[in-house]
């Protein structure tokens, strides 16, 4: 919860949903090219820090923590409405937050989950991006990792408060337990790019758990 409110106050969330467009001068592209980071553990399976419909490896020194949206909203008191807005984005709700600070970086890899339904991965991902304030110039692609196929997006968010833009990446897959979105943000584009190896590790090791 602290990470979420800090992100808001520093302008880490930012405007409106992107479409299937070229990224122009922003440098965003849907296919991240960083090498995968060294493995430090995994999340998603039963008994891990976050039990999810998928499992994946976490970069070395990154710290995972389960997010219980209902409890966090209730605990926020007068900030409950703000907390709820941060914990729910489009068709999904935050379920896990993996903090890069122990690895010396500023940002999070966050996992969002939704209710089972008929929407495909790209539809879920477009709903996620469309719900993010300041989002634009989205570039979508299909990815396959092992036995998992899903949709991936690179886009740009612009903070009106800070008058700055930064690149973000997210991916979505559908599972019997509902859709899952993995999102990598960061303080700015430089920090985001430094954290891309952790995102690539998660994507390359993604598998359905059946939870």
Image (spheres, rainbow, N blue to C red):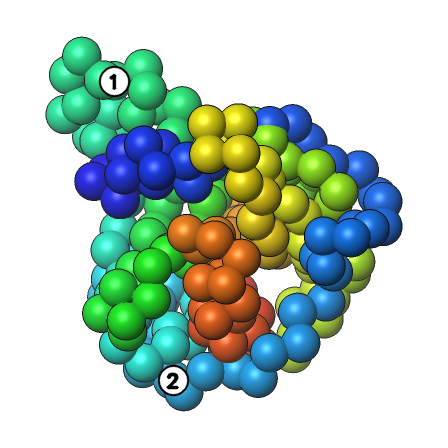
Point 35% across, 38% down: residue: 10
Image side of residue 152 versus residue 134, left or right: right
Task: Please state the horizontal and vertical placement of residue 51, each as a whole percent of the image.
Answer: 33, 57
Q: Quadrant of the C terminus?
A: bottom left
Point 34% across, 51% down: residue: 96
**Looking at the image, can residue 49 be seen?**
yes
Task: Please state the horizontal and vertical placement of residue 93, each as a whole percent of the image.
Answer: 43, 36
SS assignment at label 2 = strand
Q: Give the residue pinned by disc 1.
A: 80
Residue neighbourhood size for the residue with mark 2, other residues' Cα within 10 Å, grouped as few (<14), some (14–19), many (≥20): some
35 above or below 24?
A: below
Residue most toward the front?
Answer: 163
Point 53% across, 57% down: residue: 189
Residue neighbourhood size for the residue with mark 1, other residues' Cα within 10 Å, grouped as few (<14), some (14–19), many (≥20): some
Image side of residue 207 versus residue 86, left or right: right
Q: Which disc is residue 39 wearing?
A: 2
158 above or below 15?
A: below
Mark 1–mark 2 contact, CB under 8 Å? no
Q: Which disc is residue 180 wearing?
A: none
61 above or below 188?
A: below
Task: Please state the horizontal and vertical placement of residue 30, each as a whole percent of the image.
Answer: 73, 60
First-in-chain label (1 vs 2): 2
SS assignment at label 1 = helix
Point 36% across, 45% down: residue: 95
């Amino acid at each position: 919860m602290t990470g979420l409110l800090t992100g808001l106050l520093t302008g880490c969330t930012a405007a409106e949903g992107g479409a299937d467009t070229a990224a122009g001068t922003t440098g965003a592209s849907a296919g991240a090219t960083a090498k995968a980071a060294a493995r430090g553990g995994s999340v998603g399976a039963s008994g891990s820090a976050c039990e999810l419909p998928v499992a994946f490896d976490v970069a070395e020194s990154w710290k995972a923590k389960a997010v219980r949206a209902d409890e966090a909203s209730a605990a926020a008191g007068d900030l409950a409405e703000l907390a709820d807005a941060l914990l729910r984005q489009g068709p999904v709700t935050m379920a896990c937050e993996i903090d890069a600070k122990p690895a010396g970086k500023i940002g999070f890899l966050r996992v969002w989950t939704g209710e089972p339904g008929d929407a495909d991965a790209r539809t879920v991902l477009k709903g996620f991006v469309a719900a993010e304030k300041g989002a634009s110039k989205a570039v979508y692609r299909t990815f396959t990792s092992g036995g998992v196929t899903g949709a991936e997006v690179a886009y740009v968010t612009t903070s009106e408060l800070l008058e700055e833009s930064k690149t973000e990446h997210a991916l979505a897959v559908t599972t019997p337990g509902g859709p899952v979105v993995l999102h990598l943000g960061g303080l700015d584009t430089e920090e985001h790019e430094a954290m891309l190896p952790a995102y690539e590790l998660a994507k390359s090791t993604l598998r359905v758990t059946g939870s």
